[in-house]
Amino acid sequence: MLTDAQSASLLASAALIAVVHTAAGPDHTVPFVMLARARGWSRARTLWITALCGLGHVASSLILGALASALDGALGPSSFALADFESSRGDLAAWGLVLFGSVYALWGARQALRSRAGLALHSHDGHMHVHPHGAHEHEHAPSELRPKRRSATFWTLFTLFVLGPCEPLIPLYFLPLSQGEFALASCTALVFALATIATMLTLVSLAHTGLSTLRLAALDRWSHTLAGTAISATGLATLVCGL
């Protein structure tokens, strides 16, 4: 059994480690900021997407951790396969960022070249399409008459964050769990999750504000390409530097 002082220290450590881990990893911030700039997301939409991805990021590690704990009691050594999978998820998510960023950058370059050739990308009520430069008066069907489409960008980001593990959370979570203190384990996970998501929201909000004040009209045509390149670079940095 952990003493009250040890429990308080564990909770404080969970909060501090979550903040440092999140702030030190550009993959927790850069994709949201760059995509928000390129796709014209509002601050509210950007933060909402960030929060959902952060929740999926933490929840996936908790679910795997709980499953590994259950299998440790039931199957013993058989649970090592889960531990191996957990350790490999970081590389898998990082390579996913590299691939997603590269594909998005190529798509952005295609749109930029179309714009240069006299074709411009326009957005009306969330519906994106291409027009020649100049007048293009027309009417769109009301948004409620168009079929609802899921955002491929959001679901790709969410999937990549679910794949990405919260490595520091696992030992913090297992320490009280191994002592049979399930309430403390739950509190530790909750503190870690709240600190992680709060840090992501704070950093993304600050970066979103700072980037929105910059006047980069000359680069707007290449915003998607720049966003994809930055996301891909973030994935490479995670792989090479272990961020």
Image (cartoon, rainbow, N blue to C red):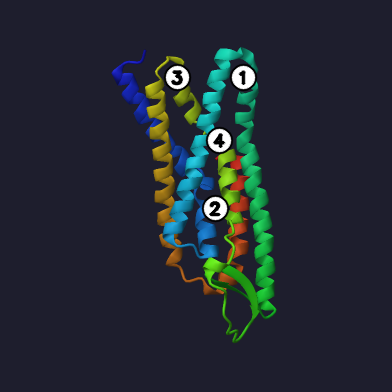
Q: CA distance from mark 3 to mark 1?
A: 16 Å
Q: Position of residue 238 (x, y in %)?
A: 59, 42
Q: Residue at x 60, y 30 (%)?
A: 86
Q: Which residue in the structure is indicated by mark 2?
A: 31
First of labels 4, 3 by sequence position: 4
- Name above or below for residue 205 compared with residue 63: below
* Disc 4, SS: loop
Would you say the residues marked 4 and 2 are in contact, meaning their CB atoms lie under 8 Å apart? no
- Name above or below for residue 81 compared with residue 220: above
Q: How many marks?
A: 4
* Disc 3, SS: helix
Q: CA distance from mark 1 to mark 2?
A: 33 Å
Q: Which residue in the structure is indicated by mark 1?
A: 79
First of labels 4, 2 by sequence position: 2
The quadrant of the image that shows the C terminus is: top right
Mark 1: which amino acid? Answer: Ser
